[in-house]
Amino acid sequence: MQTNVGLLGYGTVGAGVAKIISLEDSLLSQKVGWPLKLARAVVRDLSGRRSFPAPPGLLTTDPSEVVGNPGIQVVVEVMGGLEPARTLVLRALEAGQHVVTANKALLAVHGREIFETAAQSRREVAFEAAVAGAIPVIRTLKEGLAANRIQSVAGILNGTTNYILTKMSRGGAGFAATLKEAQELGFAEADPTTDVEGTDAAHKLILLTALAYGVLPTLDDIHAEGITGLEPEDFSFAEALGYVIKLLAQASLNSGDGRLEVRLHPTMIPRGHLLAGVSGAMNAVMIRGHASGDIFLSGAGAGMMPTASAVVGDIVEIARLARSESGLSKPSLGWHSLKAETVKPASEIWSRYYLRFSVLDRPGVLASLAGILARHDVSIAQMIQKGPDAAAAGESVRLVMLTHSAPAKSIRAALGETGGKEWCRGPARLLRVEDFAQG
Amino acid sequence: MQTNVGLLGYGTVGAGVAKIISLEDSLLSQKVGWPLKLARAVVRDLSGRRSFPAPPGLLTTDPSEVVGNPGIQVVVEVMGGLEPARTLVLRALEAGQHVVTANKALLAVHGREIFETAAQSRREVAFEAAVAGAIPVIRTLKEGLAANRIQSVAGILNGTTNYILTKMSRGGAGFAATLKEAQELGFAEADPTTDVEGTDAAHKLILLTALAYGVLPTLDDIHAEGITGLEPEDFSFAEALGYVIKLLAQASLNSGDGRLEVRLHPTMIPRGHLLAGVSGAMNAVMIRGHASGDIFLSGAGAGMMPTASAVVGDIVEIARLARSESGLSKPSLGWHSLKAETVKPASEIWSRYYLRFSVLDRPGVLASLAGILARHDVSIAQMIQKGPDAAAAGESVRLVMLTHSAPAKSIRAALGETGGKEWCRGPARLLRVEDFAQG
């Protein structure tokens, strides 16, 4: 058995989905319990450059090879736009297929019709990728925080505008110049209207409102304002006042009158707040639940692979569900069998180290210490020496070193050796250092 | 129809679960599609103070009224400890009941047996509450990021130690004194051993490793070290070097040799990193997926209501599953029907405002402007005046004000009036200010 997936669209996101399903087939089998297979992808034009080459025979221009095809259980809509996406999604649900979509505009505008059709057909419409890319905000509102009265959801939901605002706050350039630079660097589309005027973030806000409150507003119901009117001096004034400017999407329940407030506008938020630290093309959401307190999620909000990560996560969930026959929707740990792989012994793990020595303050000690470290292949990146102070007994000084990466056993061996020297005044202290470099 | 829940234990977390199920019954019905009912709670002793009073008849001392009771579909284990928790959980699974647990020690030590029994019985063992409280990290690894090869998981998983480290980094006091203060303030247990020596965080790390890699290590397999050895001067040296010290749990796949590295130890991390900003009793996790990139989650990692939030979220998921008969596990938006509530008109929404005026630089203008704002009940919290500079045409100056909270319509009305004055040099600029005060 396997779950067959059909794509509507093979642009950037579609190619990302194809890449994950093709290259991570073994991983996905372990997660689902059987294979996922990419069966067909509908495109407008069979030629054209693709971010990940389509396997031979995958592409077709005929939507009916995916929608309504009884051999395909999951239809992934990544074509974008309202039509024909709406018609194809509705037709797939009516035919008994599950749908995964990354199309926020489609759901914000035609959500009511699509979600009702899904409920009637008893099929899933999953859309983790439609809001904040790989950040699992849909799942968090729908499942993780399901027990909470949601007091507020606040988010930075559009990477293009956050990139422009971050640049404007740092560089002092105007909106038009910053937009142009963002376009040149690929952070803004050639036609940036839906981003900079707030429509894209507003569509996402509509979906978050529906998840948090069970109310699906229209674009006309909410206050949605973009960033085109901002001027450089507003950024300097904001900074002087201790704030940063973000395009913040907010949905909240007013505790006074019990009514919903849903809005998107440039907002000054305190410099120390977690949302203020979200810079560049990142996205973030803060959810305040009555029981959970504040939950903050951040990460890449767009891009080929982060969006594909969310789409394929949804496909895995649906495939697990299809596999379950008698009540077990997924394995407890998410894997269908535990692996026997062993964990590396701690002594063999490499890390950077902070080493603090207490040594006699006399010539030759540093040379001797450095020599021992060098013999054990431990190389020093940075050093601080702190001279004897009034409180220190005798003539000992502190030598603090940050090393380059070394295995634990080399550090242990070196410290064993230094500990035996007569110039050593007590055991060395060590801490690991983690710089979170991209591996 | 309804889903009946039985509790094993009615301590702080159990009382929190009872509180949510009792007080949020309408909300939970809308999420599940039918009611959740708390049927029975097993305690050792029927007397005793409870954080939320148990409804009459709820408490019993006989575990068999919950475990193996065919009228109870979901067994919630919040008693803690290894036995009798292990025996009761296994017996519940064998009897066909689903299990929700907050017990990290139980799963870290007896996980293999429990997860295998769950798979054989085709029942769920859900444990979102066992790691990082209300933060949905289990779900994120199991579902949201299911399509990713996980490169690393790094987390601050113990609130007590993070509280102590935060205090030590700020106050300069020693470990023993800081621990004592934490105990007095309720941030550390009377017996803090499992927290400060790292066992609690190590148990959570074992579960995160299993979710990320499908490998369930034992405590002996991993390097786990607490914070008892840290001295004040290490915090000053760390600061001088641009780092902060955190008790960091890490699981990563070494790209060089393909082996797992799993470790918990005090770690120096760069001051600007998101994890460095996690202070006090907060928890946080950063997951690096090959497709998703870095996903950061933070929030309250413990406490009665955050933990109960995670437990009840798991109960909702299981109840939804039990409700599904033909493939639809849950409603697309998480609610069984959309509500017709209207969104408040933007003009009635209250907010703080940033107002930037360009006005003539002459006596009386400020008084006139302030008078107009006051007549519209807009009150000023802070003001900056920026004098005319060489570049400014004429004699205009900038007046920037932060207001206290006011409805949008009052601001609009006030700005309409100021705009008509002869001293007004161009339209005022406004931005909303959001301080994220607790409501």
Image (tube, coloured by chain):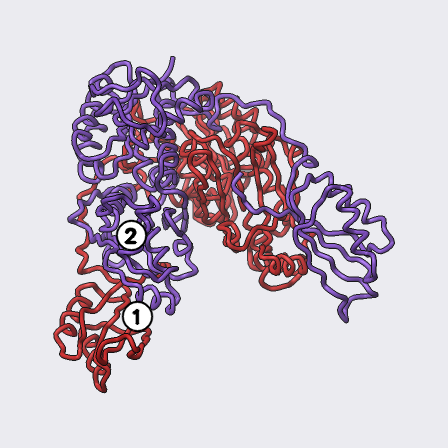
Chain colours: A red, B purple
The residue positioned 16% from the left and 32% from the top of the image is B83
Given residues A417 and B354, the one toward you in this image is B354
Read off the chain for label 1.
Answer: A
Q: Residues within 10 Å of mark 2 (few under 14, many from 20)?
A: many
Badge 2 marks a residue whose secondary structure is helix
Residue type at mark 1 is Leu
Badge 1 marks a residue whose secondary structure is strand
Q: Position of residue A151 (x, y in %)?
A: 51, 35
Q: Quadrant of the C terminus of chain A?
A: bottom left
**Residue B101 occupies quadrant:** top left
Can residue B15 be seen here? The reply is yes
**Residue A220 occupies quadrant:** top right
**What residue does disc 2 label?**
B179
Read off the chain for label 2.
Answer: B
**What residue does disc 1 label?**
A402
- Outermost residue toward the top in this view: B1
Given residues A226 and B327, the one toward you in this image is A226
Can residue A326 be seen here? The reply is no
Q: Is B82 displayed left or right of A257 in the figure?
A: left
**Residue B69 occupies quadrant:** top left
Residue type at mark 2 is Leu
Front position among marks 2 and 1: 2
Q: Position of residue B278 (x, y in %)?
A: 40, 52
Q: Which mark is residue A391?
A: none
Same chain shared by disc 2 and disc 1: no
Q: Quadrant of the N terminus of chain A?
A: top left
